[in-house]
Every structure is written in structure tokens, then in C-alpha cells.
Image (cartoon, rainbow, N blue to C red):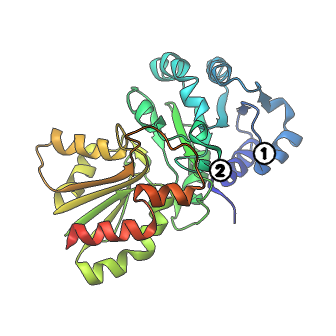
Amino acid sequence: MLSARDAFFNQIFQQVTQGENIIVITSDLGAPSLDDFRKYYPERYISVGIAEQSLISVAAGLSLTGVRVVAYGLNPFPITRAFDQIRSLLAELKIPVTLCGLNAGLCSAVAGYTHMPIEDMGMVRTLSNIRLFNPSDVCMAEKLAKEVSVCAYPRYIRFDKAVKERFYAERDLDFDRGFTTYGEPGNLCIVTFGGFVSTIRRRIDKFTQEEGKIQLIDLFSLPAETAQLVTHLQAAKKIITIEENVLAGGMGSYILELLSDNQMVKPVKRLGLQFKNGYYDKFISREYVREEQGLSEASIEKAIREMVG
């Protein structure tokens, strides 16, 4: 099955073939879906080497000439190493570069904490004028690619290697809104994104039959359209957030901030990563860390049942 990352770059290839003025810049990172792009459009493919700060600076400069730029690197380094460039160039000057990071959360847990983008969402959330996207299916990735030529603001897209399903149609996706819903509001609202969306979608009907009305919110963009999101949060008796990131500053924090800003008080449980005594000495696999951190499918199901019980 095609990954969200490869669906995105396949669509970029099609966009350029149709005449769109797009350049791809990488920090020494390839992809199967970029092979044809490099072959047929070598003048539109630039590798700056393992130099993430240069990745952002070159992307910003080229964008100012009128070309649309996709900057692509291995997470977390395009964010953690180049945060100053993202802050001072892309965000502050509102330069419409599309920054793509391969790996989200625990994708590369086997390589250790140095290769885990688990704080990047909190970092990017502190910046004005930039939006963060977590594609949860390949259709969303394709639509993000189609908007490279028309998007008026900088974007940061996190590609989870495990996201390979297609369950959305383009008409379902409103990037200005920033989220989709599945199920009816009632006893519980589950807020998540990325690969967790397909996991919850497969089980939500069963949960609803057994536990009462449960609604899933795929919060694929931060920030989202506040008024509409708040309406859905108000309709739920309880809320649970699920993310493969450190809890501080992440998506769960975003939900708590919305509740506080809108004077809503209700039970909220946040599932995510907490390394209270520092990172583990070694990481076995994504599944291992999820099990340890309460993010396995069994742990999530248990947390949901406890919330509505």
C-alpha cells in the first residue's frame, strides 16, 4: 500500500507535469515517490545535504522569487535543528513554504530518542502564521499536495510511515476547518489524529453500541477553526485525547486551552508520552514504547471504557 508520504510526492509530480511551478528541496533524504521527479525534473530537485538550517533558508529564499517550494527532511531535525529559521523566516515573514517531515511520533523509535519527533508539535504551536498538519489517510496527503501552489501560508506536514489507508474523499476535507468528525456527540468525544484515526474508526461503532454515543474528532490541523471545534467539545460529556507526542504543549494541551478559554469544565483524559525521568536507555520498537506509555490498542480501549463507565 502507498504511504501518505508517497501519495503526497506522487501528486507533486503530477502537479509539476501539469505546469505548476514547484521545486522540491531535501536535506539528503529521498523517497521512492521522488525517483521519477528527480529523473524528469532534475532542475526542480535540490539536495542541500544534511543541513536542515540551510534547508529552510534556501526554501525561504526561493519562495520569495515566486516559485512554490516543498522542503523535505527527516524528522525531528527540520524542526529541532532549524527552529530559528522557521521562526524568523517562514512564520514571521509568512513565506508559504510547505515543510514536510518524514516520521511522526514513534515511527523511528528503534533508532532511539534522537530520531523521535515527539516535541515538535509543541514547538511549532508556539509560532504564529504557520499551520501544522497530521495526515490520517492518503487522500488527505494528496489534497495537501494539490494546495502547494495556492496555499498562502507556511505549513508543516508530519508524515507517519504507518498511514497507508484511504477512507476520506476530498469533499470530506476542509483545511480551513482543520478537523473531521465521525459518529454522533454524546457520552464521549475522542480527539486524535494520524494513525490513531483508523484504529478508532474501526472500533467506534462497537464502542457506541456498548457504551453509548461516542464521537471521533480527527484533529488533523493545529490550529483548527475554533468556534466549530468548541461546539463539538461542548456537546460531549467527557473528552479523551490520544497522541503520540509528549503531553506538554501537544494536541491534548491545545484542547485543554480551548476548554479553559471558553469556560468549559468537564472530565478530560489525555493519553500521550511522558518521560518523567528522562528518555528510556534504549528503544525496542514503536509497539514497545506504546505499550510502556499506555498507547497500545488494548490500553486505549481500556481508557475509553473507563471514561464512559
Q: Is residue 148 visible?
A: no
- Residue at 61% x, 20% y is 60
Q: Residues within 10 Å of mark 2 (few under 14, many from 20)?
A: many
Point out residue 156 in the picture as x, y percentages from the top left corner: 53, 37
C-alpha separation, residue under disc 1 versus residue under disc 2: 10 Å
Quadrant in which the C terminus is drawn: bottom left
Q: Quick one: which residue is furthest to the bottom in this view? A: 209
- Taking depth in this image into account, of 50 and 20 the one nearest to the observer is 50
Q: Position of residue 146 (x, y in %)?
A: 61, 47
x and y percent of residue 206 in the render?
Answer: 35, 81
The residue tagged 2 is 5
> Does residue 301 appear anywhere in the picture?
yes
Please state which amino acid type lies under the numbered disc 2.
Arg
User: CB of mark 1 within 8 Å of CB of mark 2?
Assistant: no
Q: Earlier in the sequence, mark 1 or mark 2?
A: 2
Q: Quadrant of the N terminus?
A: bottom right
Q: Identify the residue position indicated by label 1 in the image.
A: 34
- The residue at 63%/20% (across/down) is 53
Q: Is residue 138 left or right of residue 251?
A: right
Left or right relative to 196: residue 144: right
Callout 1: 10 Å neighbours few (<14), some, many (20+)? Answer: some
- Kindly identify the amino acid type of the residue bearing the numbered disc 1: Leu
The numbered mark at residue 68 is none
Secondary element type, mark 2: helix
